[in-house]
């Protein structure tokens, strides 16, 4: 569904200052996958999401979504892409919903923009996200979690193949966040829609197939989880114990470069140094803090 290769995004702040938000990021997302993106503030995760949603264009590299080249797409095709291929859910509900419209009217709006108004489709989507009983309520009559579920229904209005969500649970409590993630999981399984969610909450990532960490504008690691149904089966059979359910993998770029977490470097006393000794022992690559005094004699 998504292929990013050497993806670069540079923002020009003023005549003399440029900011590189993405620095050669590589990423592949399979069709039907539900994937999380994590990273510190400024790591580039929201920039990536905006480019996947057609809200911003890459500076360089390759960005293919559902066979469409977003780097070379015309403005007209980009508008069609945003209407037909991708659905977007923001953390701020003011961006998702129009307050003077009812929940039903909000879901109908994308259909009207596309010229395919189907009221029954809008009602069906609200039922699917558990909001069928609130279709005639306006924004001020809904809780934060209810507003977010309406936003999910809006994002599905035009049968998108890809859903993008930027911190969709950032403004609700833990219980409500869990409900919202269950809605995403249900839609992923029943509709087969590919879902990419930016989140800072590692608890919520337990319900995702894969989690990708971004650091300094590059993909730094991936967390591969056991299939979601295995966790459900364990709960149903009342199997106790904290069985390891994931493995974290570091990501190598095409040049063989590897990003090492800061706390790992601190643990071996590297500090602010920019050199490591690389050893190959018994089929393993070992990184050590070199004792430079040994080489100055």
Image (cartoon, helix red, strand yellow):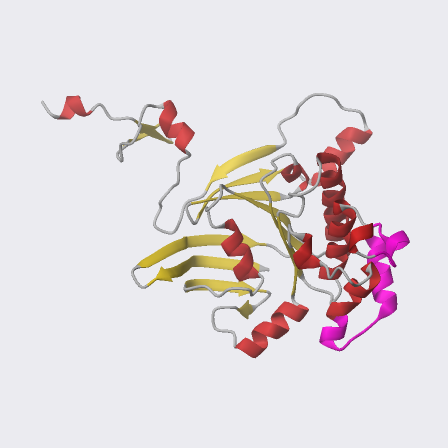
Residue ID at (26%, 34%)? 275
Image: 230 above or below 52: above
159 or 31: nearer the viewer: 159
The image position of residue 16, as x and y in percent, is: 29, 60
Q: Is residue 220 visible?
A: yes
Q: Is residue 229 magenta?
A: no
Q: Quadrant of the N terminus?
A: bottom right
Please give left or right for residue 257 compared with residue 116 in the image.
left
Q: Is residue 121 magenta?
A: yes
Q: Quadrant of the C terminus?
A: top left
Q: Which segment did they paint magenta?
A: 111-137
267 or 104: nearer the viewer: 104
The image position of residue 214, as x and y in percent, is: 48, 45
Residue ID at (39%, 40%)? 259
The image position of residue 288, as x and y in percent, is: 31, 27
The quadrant in which residue 90 appears is bottom right
Secondary structure mostly taken by the magenta-highlighted segment of the chain: helix
Image: 74 above or below 168: below
Residue ID at (46%, 53%)? 26
């Amino acid at each position: 569904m998504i292929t990013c290769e050497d993806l670069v995004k540079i923002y020009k702040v003023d005549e003399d200052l440029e900011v590189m938000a993405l620095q050669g990021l590589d990423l592949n997302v399979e069709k039907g996958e539900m994937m999380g993106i994590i990273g510190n503030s400024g790591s580039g995760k929201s920039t990536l999401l905006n480019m996947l949603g057609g809200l911003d264009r890459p500076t360089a590299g390759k960005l293919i979504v559902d066979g469409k080249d977003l780097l070379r797409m015309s403005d007209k095709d980009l508008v069609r892409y945003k209407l037909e291929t991708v659905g977007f859910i923001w953390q701020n509900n003011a961006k998702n919903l129009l307050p003077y419209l009812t929940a039903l009217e909000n879901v109908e709006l994308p259909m009207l923009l596309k010229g395919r108004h189907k009221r029954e489709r809008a009602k069906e989507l609200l039922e699917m996200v558990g909001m069928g009983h609130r279709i005639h309520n306006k924004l001020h009559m809904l809780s934060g979690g209810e507003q977010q579920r309406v936003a999910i229904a809006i994002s599905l209005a035009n049968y998108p193949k890809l859903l993008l969500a930027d911190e969709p649970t950032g403004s609700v409590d833990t219980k409500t966040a869990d409900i919202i993630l269950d809605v995403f999981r249900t839609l992923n399984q029943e509709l087969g829609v590919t879902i990419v969610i930016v989140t800072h909450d590692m608890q919520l990532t337990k319900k995702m197939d894969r989690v990708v960490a971004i650091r300094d504008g590059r993909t730094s690691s991936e967390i591969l989880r056991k299939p979601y149904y295995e966790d459900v089966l364990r709960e149903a059979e009342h199997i106790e114990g904290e069985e390891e359910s994931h493995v974290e993998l570091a990501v190598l770029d095409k040049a063989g470069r590897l990003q090492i977490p800061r706390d790992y470097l601190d643990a071996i006393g590297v500090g602010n140094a920019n050199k490591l000794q690389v050893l190959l022992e018994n089929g393993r690559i070992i990184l050590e803090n070199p004792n430079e005094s040994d080489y100055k004699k």
